[in-house]
Image (spheres, helix red, strand yellow):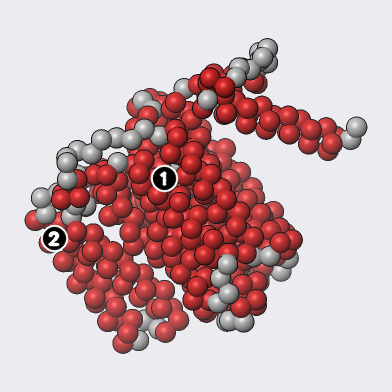
Amino acid sequence: MSVTESNCRSGIARFSTFLRAVTLSAHPGRGVISRPSPTGGLALSRFLAERKYRVYITTLIGTFITVVDATASFVAVPTIALDLGIGLPVAQWVILGNMLAVTAVLVPIGRLSDLLGRKRLFVAGYAILGAGAVLSGTATDMAVLITGRVVMGFGAALTQATSIPIVVSVFSVGERGRVLGGQMGVVGVGTVLGPVVGGLIVGLLGWRAIYWVTAAIAVAVALLGARVLKRRKARSATPLARFDVGGALLSTAFLVVFLVALSNGSRLGWRDPGVLLALLGSAALAAALWWQERRAADPILDVRLFRLRDFSVGLTSAVVAFTASAGAYFLLPFYLQMVQGVRPELLGLLLTPAGVVTALASPVMGHIADRVGHRRIATLGVALNGAGLLCLSQLGVATSLIWAVLLFMVLSLGIAS
């Protein structure tokens, strides 16, 4: 028997054990595991016997498919443009429409989950994500496809706003660094596997298959979440009466106008009257949002938190770090392909080490943060981000591929921290 065949059979056996353990943990009266293995099978069944770990696995699966779908769509855009007969400036809205929907409603959705309960929105989020994926997979023109991607963005916003609070609510303070590190590790793995898996699916089955796979897994996560999550009672008989509608509308309008201005600034020029008007409008909306949240009885964004030094500094650092690193994540594939001449099929492999670093370092850094304090680890992460970005800014035609990959790994280590 070859090594490959042996590994495949071993993997199938382990996956079968996992599925049986999940089934029996969810339906304890339907059977028992006879003579469980003293190592893998028994340990897994004990692990899944605790509700908090079943909740954790549900959120991990959901996070993974959300990230894979987002990153796989990058690979599919050129094929979509060719298939639908459109240019790349229009095709980019497959990505931008999804991101815009996520960003615009994430803050009000987070507040809404506090009022209505996170289980409802978690399950609804994956159901909406699946529905949007079906719409995207059946699209025959760009308008329908972008609509489907926007619907997927709304669903993703519901899941992102609830996943981490759900995990935090079922684990103790001493365990949270480790489990949240695991969440970041899944994000890292999904970020790496997304382009690779997406490329394979597009090449073998076509771009629509990406969304059909997403739809199937999203529906499965919705059903699993409906079973394992507990429904929390609303704080009042009429929870929506406390919802800050004005703040929700203003925050959404501000983010939409601001992001549209940013997305068109580089294309039309920053002196374009439309871009300038959008920037001024976003500034006016931001001021109105600040005024609204100061007077709201139950604001979706408590502006008094910005008086806390740790909150303001931490939030500012996170925004700057993630904004800068997101630019690097977007530009590096173009650098490798267009400057270094890397073939598209090898691009995912070169980006894999950075994702491995994120996946492995995230839980480790979370565990260390539980012991030495989160401030030190966060400071280390920002320092690594800055060093990695500074070095990446010096990349050129003569730069070694190995050096570029190593720098990207440093940046990923900073994100993991």
Q: Which residue is mark 1?
A: 123
**Mark nearer the viewer, 1 or 2:** 1
The one of 101 and 127 positioned closer to us in this rendering: 127
- Residue at the far front: name it: 30
Above or below, 44 relative to 284: above
Return the residue at label 2: 292
Q: Which residue: 19% across, 72% down?
A: 284
Indicate the amino acid at tag 2: Gln
Residue drawn where x is 39% and y is 78% of the image: 265
**Amino acid type of disc 1?**
Val
Residue 23 screen position, x and y as percent: 57, 28
Residue 404 in view in this figure: no
Picture coordinates of residue 354, whole percent (x, y): 59, 49
Q: Tell me the element at label 1.
A: helix
For the residues labelled 1 and 2, the Cα–Cα distance comes to 31 Å
Q: Quadrant of residue 46?
A: top right
Quarter that holds the N terminus: top right
Q: How many other residues sit within 10 Å of disc 1, few (<14), some (14-19) or many (≥20)?
A: many
208 in relation to 2, above or below: below
Q: Which mark is residue 369?
A: none
**Picture coordinates of residue 196, whole percent (x, y):** 67, 55
Q: Residue at x 62, y 82 (%)?
A: 85
Q: Position of residue 108 (x, y in %)?
A: 27, 55
The disc, 1 or 2, on the residue closer to the chain's N-terminal end is 1
Query: Is 51 on the left or on the right of 46, as rendered?
Result: left
Proximity of marks 1 and 2: CB atoms separated by less than 8 Å = no
Name the element at disc 2. helix
Q: Image point 35% across, 86% down: which residue?
A: 272
